[in-house]
Every structure is written in C-alpha cells, then in structure tokens.
Image (cartoon, helix red, strand yellow):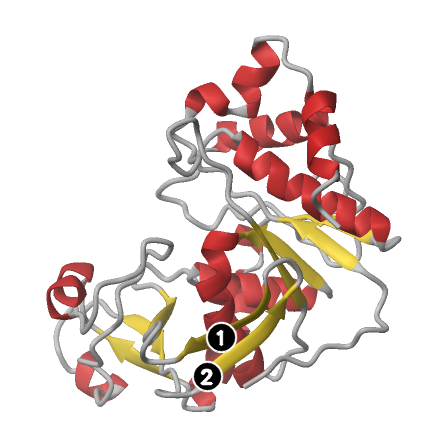
C-alpha cells in the first residue's frame, strides 16, 4: 500500500497539542517546524486542541498552552480561540464526526469488538513492542468474536479494534526521513479505534479531524511514524484523502533521554519564567526545517 495525495491543494498545516501538561521544548521545535513549513508553502496554519483524553488533560493546561504558544511566537489562522471554517477546533467537541467514522468502519467490516484488557494483551502479545511505540502487538484473541456474543454477557466492557491486513507492507515517503515501510501484523497489530469509555482513540480522532480540516501535511515527532502506518489504513478504509507526512527528529535532554512533559525544567513555562529568549532557539531551528 502506498499513499496518494493531491499535490495541488493549497497547503494547510496544523499544530495539534494535547493539554496533558506544560509544553516543552521538544513540542515547541516540532510545532516551529510545522509553522515554518506552512510559511514556506504560503499556507494556512490550524491549531487544534486535542483534549480528548479526559483522564489526563486539565483545563488549566489549555489556557497555559495557548499563552505559551503565543509567547513563543506561534501564529495560527484557525483555532479554538479564533474560529474558522472547520470549527469546532476542540477535539472533544468533534465526537459527532468521530462517531460517524466509527459507524462507517463497522459497516465496512473493518473493526471488531475486543474485551481484552491491557494486562491480557501484555501477557499474550506475540512480540515485544518497539521503544518508540506504546502498543504491543495484539495477539488476535477477539478477532472472531461478534458483538451479539459480547452483548449477551452482562456488563462487559469492550473496545472497537481495527483488523489490520496481516502481511501487507504499508509504505509512505516521509518529508524528512524519506521512504518508510511497516508490515501490518509484524511491526504493528490490530489497534483500538474506540475505547470502552466511549471516546475515540488517538488514531481514529486524528485521521478524522485532519481529513475534515483538509490538512495537506502532518508535521509531528518521529515517535509517531508507526502510528502513521496505522492511520494510512484508516484513511483507506474511510475513503479519505491522505495528507503528506513529515516526522521531526526527537529532542533529548543532556543524558540522551527523550523530552517528555515530566521535564518541567525544559517546559516553555519554565523557560519564560527564567527570562529565556525564544528568538535564539527559533533561529537555530529554522535552519533545519526545510
């Protein structure tokens, strides 16, 4: 499977932060590359607040996120604070679109109900998962189960899981790293598209929203390359146009550990409070984003 996308469409890039903590320099650099690529292509930059994970996101981080992004020098044309033609720009307000996509996947026979817990999967997974990916390969336990069989059991929680085409090679050309390929069933397995607490997974929500907002290039961290392979299968199953992808190298701290939101000292908020200068950082990053 390879990707096809319309190259003549006006460029639309996006920033898609998740308000689960203060943004750190790794996010800022990836977002800055996204903004620079939008600028170089004379395009429109969209801000989408990915506030779907209600267990982890906090309202105070939403305001902080907008404030920190503006302080750092980000400028977007569409977003939750300024609206636009593809509103709403808060992901949690887009459930109608996500649910419609779920129904299309169900009607097409692409997904199945799965009662396995994370613990079940970890203990039965066929292979260890890669360091850059948080999802072990699903062993296929529920592949043959029907919804009626699951519903006949009292109070059973289940996720909807996408059935990957085992053995198919998923390829795409990354704007930074060049040709990429992943084998379905070997590099990644059947993945969750709708969680038992009745919200879409990241994989489904991001595909539906990027397509609806007519994003032409997705710029994000290199840790999401494998997710791109999963998402390409969703684009195909849903009959949606596929954007281009540009994965940025990840930023690490002095000991080589990947930056995460727990690195409070490297958050934009801490940088700002200590009188840091975003311009100096931006200048060094701008050289690397073409």
Q: Is residue 235 above or below residue 68?
A: below
Residue 79 appears anywhere in the view? no
Q: Earlier in the sequence, mark 1 or mark 2?
A: 2
Residue at the disc numbered 2: 169
Q: Is residue 170 above or below residue 263?
A: below
Q: Is residue 286 above or below residue 67?
A: below
Image coords of residue 153 (percent x, y) = 13, 78
User: Which residue corresponds to the image point at 64% horizontal and 54% vertical from the top-left?
Assistant: 219
Residue at the disc numbered 1: 181
Asked if disc 1 and disc 2 are in contact, CB closer than 8 Å, the reply is yes
Q: Nearer the viewer, residue 199 or 202?
A: 202
Q: Residues within 10 Å of mark 1 (few under 14, many from 20)?
A: some
Q: Nearer the viewer, residue 223 or 211?
A: 223
The quarter of the displayed image where residue 242 is located: bottom right
Image coords of residue 220 (percent x, y) = 58, 52
Quadrant position of the N terminus in the picture: bottom right
């Amino acid at each position: 499977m390879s990707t096809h996308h319309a190259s003549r469409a006006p460029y639309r890039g996006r920033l898609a932060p998740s308000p689960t903590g203060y943004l750190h320099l790794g996010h800022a650099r990836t977002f800055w590359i996204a903004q620079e690529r939008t600028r170089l292509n004379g395009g429109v930059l969209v801000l989408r607040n990915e506030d779907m994970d209600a267990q982890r996101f906090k309202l105070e981080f939403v305001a902080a996120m907008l404030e920190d992004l503006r302080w750092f020098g980000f400028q977007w044309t569409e977003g939750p604070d300024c609206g636009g033609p593809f509103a709403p720009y808060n992901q949690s307000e887009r459930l109608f679109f996500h649910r419609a996509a779920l129904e299309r996947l169900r009607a097409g026979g692409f997904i199945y109900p799965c009662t396995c817990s994370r613990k079940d999967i970890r203990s039965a997974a066929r292979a260890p998962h890669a360091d850059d990916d948080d999802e072990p390969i699903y062993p296929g336990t529920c592949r043959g189960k029907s919804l009626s069989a699951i519903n006949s059991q009292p109070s059973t929680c289940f996720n909807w899981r996408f059935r990957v085409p085992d053995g198919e090679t998923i390829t795409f050309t990354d704007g930074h790293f060049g040709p990429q390929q992943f084998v379905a069933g070997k590099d990644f397995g059947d993945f969750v598209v709708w969680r038992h607490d009745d919200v879409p997974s990241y994989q489904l929500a991001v595909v539906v929203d990027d397509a609806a907002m007519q994003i032409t290039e997705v710029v994000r961290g290199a840790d999401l390359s494998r997710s791109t392979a999963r998402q390409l299968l969703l684009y195909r199953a849903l009959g949606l146009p596929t954007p281009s992808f540009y994965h940025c190298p990840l930023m690490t701290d002095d000991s080589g550990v990947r930056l995460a939101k727990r690195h409070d000292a490297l958050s934009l908020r801490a940088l700002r409070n200590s009188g840091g200068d975003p311009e100096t950082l931006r200048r060094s990053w701008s050289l690397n984003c073409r």
